[in-house]
Each structure stands twice: as C-alpha cells, then as structure tokens.
Amino acid sequence: MLRPASRRTSRHRASLSGPEPYPPEELSATEPYGRQAPGRSRRRGRRSPGRLGRLLRRRTVRVILALVAVFCCWLAFSVGQALAAPGGGSVSSKMAEWARDHYLGPVVTFGEWLSYSPPKVGGKPGFSLAAPASAVAKPKAKVKHAHGFQPIIPARLSSPAGSPLPGEGVWRVLETVKGQPAMFGTFLRPDKVHTSYVAGIVSMDQRLVSFQLRPGTEDPGPGNWKAQSWIPPGSRTGLRGTFNGGFKLNTAGGGFYLNGTTHGTLVNGAASVVYYRDGDIKIGAWGSEVRMTNDVVGVRQNLKLIVDHGKVPSTVNQNVLGSWGATLGGSYYVWRSGLGITKDGRIIFVYGPALDVQSLAGLLQRAGAVEALQLDINPFWMSFEYYKADGHASDPTPENLLPTQQQTAYRYYSVYSRDFTAVYAK
C-alpha cells in the first residue's frame, strides 16, 4: 500500500527541481518583457520627468533658449570679425573698439578706469634727448639771390619743465628734399610735474613736402575713396613721414571727405584739416577759416580748435571728458596728439604721454602754431614715423620718432584700420 509523500520528501524534490517560479503577479511586475497583469500599472518601471525636463517642455522657455542661441552665434561671429579684421591693433584694443561700436562705451571706460595708473611725478626720461651732432639743425646764411631757396630753421624751444636737459628743444633734421632740410624733430618735457615723460614735436616745410589723406579700412570704412588704406610697394618713393588721424568719426564731431566721397557730414565750426590738390594743407574752423573749393581733395574734422588765432581758448579746460574724448577712464593725463600750422605755413605735429588738452595746446603754441586741433588720443593710436632711404629710395626704412610709442614703425606698410596722413617729397 502506497503512502502519501511526506512533507520532507516534497521539499526535497522541490529543491532538486530548482526554485519555485514567481507568481504571475510578481513576474509581470518585475520582468520588463513580461505580460502585464490586468489592472497593474507600469509606473514602477518609468521615472517621472524632473524639474528641468518639465521646464524645457514649456514653449516660452524653448523660444527664449532659441533666441539666446541665435544671439550667441551672432556675438561670436561679430567679435570674431572684429578680431580678424586687418589693419593693426592688439586684441584688447580691438575688443575695446568693438564694445564702443556696440553701445558698451561706459563698460569699456569703467574697465579702463579700474586699470588706469596716473603718470608718476618727477623723475627723468628713460632715453637721451640729445641728437647726434651731425643731425643738429644749424642756421644758414640768408641767400641774397631773389630766387634762391632759404630754408626755415626753427629756433630752439624752451622747456615747459624749466631748466632744459641736454638736447631738449634742439631741432634735428629728420628729412631733406633736394638737399634742403624739410622736416625737423625735437623733444620736450610737457610740464614741471611729469618730468620723466617726453613729447615729440615735428616741424614740416610745405614748400618741400606734400600731404596725402589716407582712409582706414574701418574708419571711415569702405567707399570710393580713390586712395589706399596703406602704403604698398611701388608707392613709397619720396615718402618722408606718416602720422595718425583723429577720433573715430562717430565721436569726432564732424565728417570725412576724400576725392568726392563723404562719410558723415562736414560740420560748420568743427576743427578741420583741409588737403589741397597741390599737396598743401590748411587748418581752421570749417565754414569760416576754411571751406570747400574746387582745389580741395580731402577734409578731416575733429572736435574744436585748441589753438585759434595764436591763442589757446579757455574752452580747453571746460567739460574735458565730453569735449576732448573718452580718455582712459576719463583721466586727463594720457597720450594725445595734435596738428597745427604756423604763420609762415609750416605744419607742426605734437604727440606724447602724460598730456592734458591744455599742455598739448601749449606745446603746439610753443612750436609756433597759430591754428591747431587735437587728433587722436590713447597710446595705441599714437604715431609719427619718418623714413630713411639708405640707398633704397623705393622702399625706405620707417623709424618711430618717440621710442616710447607702442606700435611698430611699419604699421602703415600693411593695411590699416584708421585714417592717417602720408607725407611725400614735392
């Protein structure tokens, strides 16, 4: 007679045949591919979207993100274009120019203010002001022949700093034309306080040299100027000098005219450098002292006159920041440049560090200017170069007048972003 299996035997057989299968309910709940039991939910196998996911599902958020992406692409493209543009300039200067052109001038000025260091007081210059004896300009006896050429040798300039250093204010011959001295240069300290800083001063005889206005690739920018934005090979024979132009035209308070094309508007009363067909230039207030004629080929306006009829107007000390440019953080003693004309028609160029508008005007007046205007400011744009042929008349070697100016002397031998003036032998 058979007996029913004992519990122990049943358990023993179950252990030999493997673990007992899951109940249907557990299988459907735990196996992703199992059949779901009726009435059961899949919530245990799916994560609910987080806060970020719910936010990204909103249409408004997606539109805002799309606009931000478009703006970032435009910003990257615009800044990239500014940094890659030809015409000289450091990364910082190009970024500053880009920011000012896109309504971020106050941000740039604030940043410059934070990094600005005022010029030190006292001290001596870091280079000698004395010229080699062979280069010192010496007055010549007057030529009695009615048609003989009599060079104009400027008198030595007194120093605003007091007792002059060796060579200070002494003119040296920088360039000659047909054997006659045509361009002179000298150095002066600007005042009795900032005695370690030096300004460069140039005197140019218009009877021997001519002046050409050149446009910049960015300022005034593209146009039918009929002139190149640099001095390429093949156009360097007779080159005697180059110097910087004025403010960017959107802040210059005037316009730019060259060979029949105008950028902006020529403003009455604005300080103007006028370029004539014969290579001469004049300086004065537009509409009263100088005006448009058939002989005019170029006009460069910049702010107001800082020497007028031989006098420095009191207005140079009024509203300095608003009238004379957004200097480094609004500080008044910075690199500045200016251009003037003497009673006998010589052209005077002055530039240097630690200058306010009053001291720049004073140096121009001291050098004989009866009409003068400020040109550009801040160190990166300051520029005066003279050119030595040294047996290579078609490719002269440029030299900076001031050893402390920032950019290379070759700046105008490649495409340049800002307008400038080229000086040639007549």
Image (cartoon, rainbow, N blue to C red):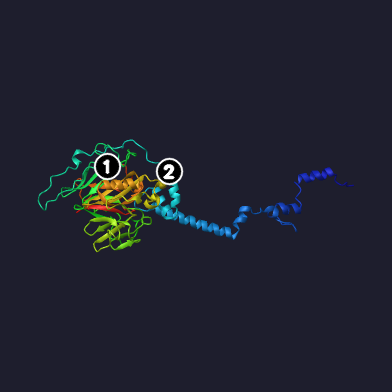
Identify the residue at image location x=80%, y=43%.
12
Percent position (x, y) of residue 66?
A: 53, 58
**Residue 366, can we see it?**
yes
**Residue 171 in the figure: left or right of residue 106:** left
The local secondary structure at tag 2 comes to: helix
Disc 2 marks a residue whose amino acid type is Ser
Residue indicated by mark 1: 187
Marks 1 and 2, Cα distance to the nearest angstrom? 28 Å
Percent position (x, y) of residue 198?
A: 30, 41
Residues 126 and 59: in front is 126
Residue 115: which disc?
Answer: 2
Percent position (x, y) of residue 71?
A: 49, 57
Residue 415: which disc?
Answer: none
Q: Is residue 56 above or below residue 120?
A: below
Mark 2 Cα-neighbour bin, 10 Å: few <14, some 14–19, many ≥20: few
Q: Is residue 422 above or below residue 224?
A: above
Residues 138 and 263: in front is 138
Residues 299 and 345: in front is 345
The local secondary structure at tag 1 comes to: strand
Mark 1 Cα-neighbour bin, 10 Å: few <14, some 14–19, many ≥20: many
Disc 1 marks a residue whose amino acid type is Phe
